[in-house]
Structures are given as structure tokens and as C-alpha cells.
Image (cartoon, rainbow, N blue to C red):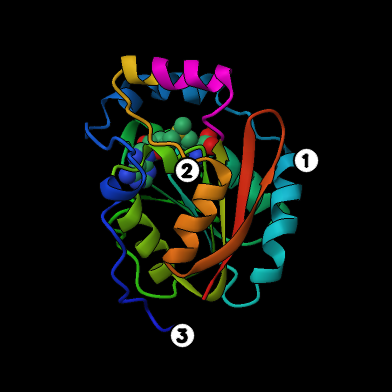
Amino acid sequence: MCTRLVQIVPEPSDTDGHDRSGSDMGFFDWAAPLFGRYGDRWSAEDAEIIAGWLRPHLTGSGAILDLGGGTGALASHLADVTGRPVTVLDPTPKMLAYLPDRPDVTSTLGRAESMPFADDSFDAVVVSDAFHHFRDQDGAVREMQRVVRCGGGVLVLELDPRPPVMRAVVLVERLLGEPGSFFAPEDLCAFMALRGIDGTCEGQRGVSYRFLGTVR
Ligand SMILES: C[S@@+](CC[C@H](N)C(=O)[O-])C[C@H]1O[C@@H](n2cnc3c(N)ncnc32)[C@H](O)[C@@H]1O
């Protein structure tokens, strides 16, 4: 087991200027049918690539956590290609309602900032297009570090907020009542490292990037 960090990190609002105001899941309540119907942007090929990144970490129980996993679209593909059980944790019941009915993809209602799992429950956590929605990103990373075993994998798929197209996306989300808090890749790497998860950030398609790290 890793030594859990008791390091004091500065309050996020003092260091990165991210706005964390706003708090409910209203946006995802009304958006859930859209995600359910059109949200399958994950293909089996995507899942193969992601599984390749995670596989070196899947040496314990093999259990994978899809944090903020929504409708379970990625979780299903991941369970298919890895043959490992995937747990989807999400606070929006209307998103979880779209989860497929299969024994190897299970749902848990909850928030990233306070997960109802024991220490070291998972070999890896995946957070796709969800990290910027977490209201307390510091608390969420601490929880990720707790529920993923020492040496386990942390994969965060995010969007770089700096290109002009993303500025428009951020604005639209805000207008719709969802104040996302995005990180530039190098800032996410630094944020994670300060909290006990070392890794690298690498650009993917378009404005997407991945953080891939290991719990220390
Ligand atoms: C844009 S959706 C992405 C869903 C899925 N990961 C995907 O890639 O299709 C963001 C998800 O994050 C969830 N979410 C928002 N705040 C959260 C929190 N504090 N903890 C866990 N999940 C959260 C929402 O309910 C929603 O299902």
C-alpha cells in the first residue's frame, strides 16, 4: 500500500484561479437523454488503445473504475476489450440509467470527491471528459489516490481549454449552467504530481489530451 499523502497543498483558488462556483447536477439531468442517444463516441478501437495504456497496471484484482462514467458507453467497451470488471461511479441517476445490463459493468451512485469504496479497491481509474466537471478537484484526486492501489494507473482524458474553439465550448457550458474547470495539460500534470500521482500529458486528437499516471 502507498503511503497516503498528508501533504498540505495550497487551496486551489489561491493557485490556479479556477472558478469552482455552482454545484448541482442539473445540467446532466437534462443532458442525459442526449448522452444516452448520441453519446456513444467511444469505439472498440478507442477502448483497445485505452486498454493498452492501462494494461501494465491491471496486475492485481484487475478492477477498473470509470469515474464520472455517465452512461457507461466507454465502460462497456473497456470491459469487452480487457475482460476485467468495470465500475461506473457517477452522481447523475439519469446518466446511470443508460448503463447496459451486464454483470461486468456495474454502477455506483456517488461523487468523485467522496467515493463509497474501500482503500485500494481498483487497479486503475479512468476519467473521461469528466474531470473538469468535478467541483472539488483536489478532493477528487485525493480520493483517486486512495481507492486505486499503490502502483495502479490513473488515466484522465481531458480537453485543452486554450484553443479558440474550446473557449467557445467553455462559454457555452457556463451559459448552460455547468461551470467547467479545465486544465492545460502541463498544469494537470503538476496538479497530479503534487498530490501523489506522477505521470505525463500527451496530446490526442484535436483539443483532446491524456494524462497517464501511476499512484505512488
Ligand atoms: C460529459 S459526461 C462524460 C461521461 C463519460 N465519462 C463519457 O466519456 O462519455 C460527464 C459526467 O461527469 C459526471 N460528473 C459530474 N460531476 C461529477 C462528480 N463530482 N463526480 C463524479 N462524476 C461527476 C456527470 O454526471 C456526467 O455523467
For the residue pair 130 and 89, the one nearer the viewer reads as: 130
Tell me the residue at 63%/46% (across/down). Answer: 210
The residue under label 2 is which amino acid type? Gly
Where residue 184 appears, as percent x and y from the top left, is: 53, 40
Disc on the earlier residue, 1 or 3: 3
Numbered disc 1: secondary structure: helix
- Magenta stretch: dominant SS? helix
Which mark, by number, is residue 69?
2
Where residue 50 appears, as percent x and y from the top left, is: 69, 50
* Number of other residues with Cα within 10 Å of mark 2, as a class: few under 14, some 14 to 19, many 20 or more: many
Q: Find out whether residue 165 is within the magenta segment.
A: yes
Q: Mark 2 vs ligand 1: CB under 8 Å?
A: yes
Whole-number angstrom distance, CA of label 1 to CA of label 2? 18 Å
Q: Find out whether residue 36 is within the magenta segment.
A: no
The answer, for residue 110, to whether it is visible in the render is no
For residue 175, what is the image quadrant? top left
Where residue 83 appears, as percent x and y from the top left, is: 68, 60
Numbered disc 3: secondary structure: loop
Residue 147 as seen in the image, left or right of residue 126: left
Tell me the residue at 56%/34% (across/down). Answer: 160
The residue under label 1 is which amino acid type? Glu
Considering only vertical position in the picture, is 108 above or below 30?
below
User: In the image, which is nearer the foreground, mark 1 or mark 3?
Assistant: 3
